[in-house]
Image: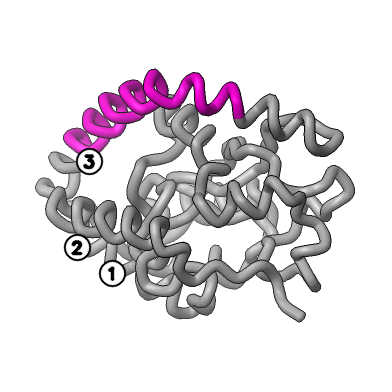
Amino acid sequence: MNSDQISNSVSGEAASFVPSASFKRYDKVKRALDLFFAFLLSVVAAIPCGVICLLVKATSPGPAIFKQTRIGRFGKPFHCFKFRTMFAEAPQYCATPDLHDANQFITPLGKILRKTSLDELPQLFNVLKGDMSFIGPRPLIPEEKGIHEERLKRGVYELRPGISGLAQINGRDRVGAEDKVRYDEEYLHKISFSFDAKILLGTFFGVLRGNDIVEGHE
């Protein structure tokens, strides 16, 4: 299932989730909050991002920013941005948890960026563009077929993907595919300002503790 097939499946899928009036109202509020805070944080993070770019370039060959196709709202593909944390020869179309001994591909600086989640800072640009939100289901690469199929069935693609989400505060890399989709669906039905605030707070403390980060499998 490639990105075009996913997008076509979403447009042709019988509606498994019909957005309510409250869902639509909060969607507009959420987008306004995303724009405000993404702009504010982009200004604050401009100098740190510049420093990280220089460090990435200085410590390993390759671009500072890693661009990868992910699946977004309504199943439409977009380019997701991150600071590059892997060597240039790392597989590009494989989810990190599926890599055998992923640590061999991660740069020394990349390990620090991933542990602190600083590699996600360029996704502020994705939020400003409207590809992503601060909170929502994590965007997947097209090759993660099983989860895409389950998301399609449950209406999850009514949501913008997020920098963090419910699955990320409930196990992050340790959460299996079935549980990820269950958390995505739960978020779809519980989405609200207070629920987003709870996830945001959980994300903050999770990053501080460096919880549940697993790089690939043995």
Residue 129 percent across, percent down from the top left = 44, 26
Q: Principal SS element in the magenta part?
A: helix
Which residue type does callout 1 highlight?
Glu
Q: CA distance from mark 1 to mark 3?
A: 16 Å
Q: Which residue is mark 2?
A: 190
The quadrant where residue 94 appears: bottom right
| Badge 1 vs badge 2, beta-carbon distance below 8 Å | yes
| Badge 3 vs badge 2, beta-carbon distance below 8 Å | no
Q: Label 3 crowding class (10 Å Cα cut-off): few <14, some 14-19, many 20+?
A: some
Which residue type does callout 2 highlight?
Lys
Q: Secondary structure at mark 2?
A: helix
Write the residue at 16% across / 52% down: 192
Write the residue at 82% across / 47% down: 87
Residue 198 percent across, percent down from the top left = 20, 58
Q: Is residue 18 magenta?
A: no
Write the residue at 49% across / 71% down: 212
